[in-house]
Image: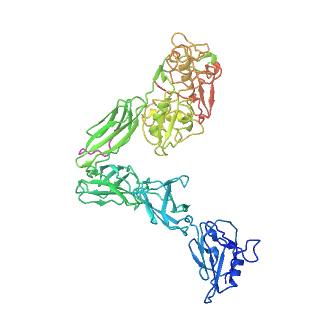
Amino acid sequence: MALVHDGLFLWRRFKHVGAFWCNGCRDRNPSLEELFMSISRFPHWAVRLFPNASEAGRVQTRRRRTRQPAQQISLESLEPRQMLSVNPASSGWTATSSVNDISSMVVLAPQNTIGILATATVPSAPTSVVAVSGNAQLAVTWVAPASTGGSPITEYLVKYSSNSGASWTRFLPSSGLPITALSCTVTGLTNGTPYVIKVIAKNAVGIGPPSAHSAPATPATVPSATTSVVAVSGNAQLAVTWSAPASTGGSPITEYLVKYSSNSGASWTRFFPSSGRPIMALSCTVTGLTNGTPYVIKVIAKNAVGIGPPSAHSAPATPLATALTPSFGATTSTADGFTVQISNYDASYTWAGTATASGSVVVSASGLVMVTGVAASTISTATITTTKANTVGGSALVTATSRVAMSMVTVGNAGNAADTNTGSLYGAVSYTYRIGAYDVTGSQYMAFLNAVGQTDTYGLYNTNMGTDAQIAQISRSGASGSYSYNVMNGTGNRPITWVSWFDCARFSNWMSNGQPSGAQASTTTEDGAYNVNGATTGSAVAANATNPNTGLAPTYRIPFENEWYKAAYYKGGSSAGYWNYATQSNSAPGTTIGSSPNQANYNNAIGHATDVGSLSGSGSFYGTFDQTGNVWQWNDLTGTTGSSRGFRGGNWYSGYSSYVSSSDRNNNDPSYEGGSIGFRLASPA
């Protein structure tokens, strides 16, 4: 018995499904379930679906000789070219009609089995892509796709990216053959550059989707050799330096291995620092060596990949005992340098000295260092060295400032009358004396600070000295106990300011005591012309008639008011009387720097303090300069104790000529420090 049903074939690209007309279903597409339910009524019949177009729609059934139970399948699990047994009662199938296109599909159903021969597709994506670093390369592995697409995989396309997948480059093996295995080595990469990898499977149908990217991997190799290894002798040690490798190999250097050899490289010993930490710098000191034994050194760089090649050997270097390191006593300033005694002088050594700035250095047979040829109030440093056979030379520096040279002028005409314009109060001096031709300068005060201000117990330095750009500027560096001072911005010849009367008294003591170096004590700053004895506030003390440190009259002190007034305004000679201005004039001065007469720095015409003596044509009768304008100057009034001290002369920003004239007189607390008040010194004739 034969039953023929009209029918059509329905297929889709990846999984092909057959659908038929059945009795009672001529006006619609039946579901596959309906179709197979129809067939299931005839368990002794087999079904054949004709594969060619002329027989399309024909279903032929015939009785089977033996009854066998039906088998169950799910059409959703069909793969191309897979033969499956089906249970016509299975549910969940769907059917979609398509007409007249069965050219790529053959369905055979011997007995109770329906076979579907479907068109192949591209493979699915490979998985588990892993890249492992190598030298300019990555070893890549992956897992095959879950589906080949029904067609054997013919090739894997491997691509790499150095910008996190923004762009890709396909890797082509040098053999020219396609990659068919599940691994390859991607070469030609740049060490130190991170890459990600993706892999794509290909079959006869085409190229499948790409895999997920691999984790980033960075090609790297060991570093190249270090270079320029130099060893310098020390006491039972060598100071070793080297240059980094030209290439890190693409991985940061994690350590340098330093090795030494005492037999020209026949055998080597690695040096381990006592800290236990790896050597990361480009230098180290190799310790524990034997003095008198020559060594060569090699250095090897290491990174995460491994140990690079060794450097070339250093030149041989021999550790030697250290020669004597000089030590020194107190320095003594001289007019053109300084002297200092070597406290550990040993005649068995050869001694020498060089000046690092100006001047020349001689070391005597008794160990006295003499530095000469240095300008006044100038810092000079001498390097003293010792040498001896089979020792590494010792050396030490000694620094001092040459003696402050104070330019003084003599004020005669002893017993002169006071200025009647002051009610005969000021100007009369019964003796001949000397007074500074100029104010004390920044350079001179710097020399004072360097001699006694390493700790600066009594605040001789005011921090405004380092910031006030309108006056002499002095910087301070270092910590208390080792302070050092330097003139800033070429202002060393401007008058020093920001000093109290107490600072001026201590400068006078230092000068009277011979400009010694050391702590601020009775022999340096606390006694001499004035017994200030640690005072920085309160009443000014009286001037000493005798310097207790020398037994003589103090050689320098702050001028009394009458001394200052006479030096500035007295006409001298046969022309008795006083000028209104310290420029030998009764007319208000001009403000031009140079040699023109009757000029002064005031009324803010120049805008800052000028170098002392800059108005060279405008001195007083006795040859003093800048007693009109530039900066106010402290005076000691009558030299007796008191709660105030005077200042005269005006300053660069005094707005009226009267402020820089003889009629202007001021006083202030002795502890006052200001940016417009300086001082000059007086001394016995």
In the displayed structure, would residue 475 be above or below residue 240?
A: above
Q: Residue 669: x and y, percent?
A: 62, 34
Name the side, left or right, on which 581 lies relative to 359.
right
Specify the segment rendered in magenta.
340-348
What is the number of callouts on the image? Answer: 0
Task: Work out whether residue 76 or residue 555 is closer to the camera in this orientation and state it.
Answer: 76
| Residue 347 is one of the magenta-drawn residues | yes
In the displayed structure, would residue 544 be above or below residue 133?
A: above
| Residue 88 is one of the magenta-drawn residues | no
Task: Work out whether residue 683 or residue 608 is closer to the camera in this orientation and state it.
Answer: 608
Name the side, left or right, on which 529 lies relative to 676.
left
In the image, what residue occupies the spot 54% across and 52% down? Answer: 167
> In the rendered image, is residue 502 in sight?
no
> In the rendered image, is residue 149 in sight?
yes
In the displayed structure, would residue 608 be above or below residue 669?
A: above
Q: Residue 125: x and y, percent?
A: 55, 64
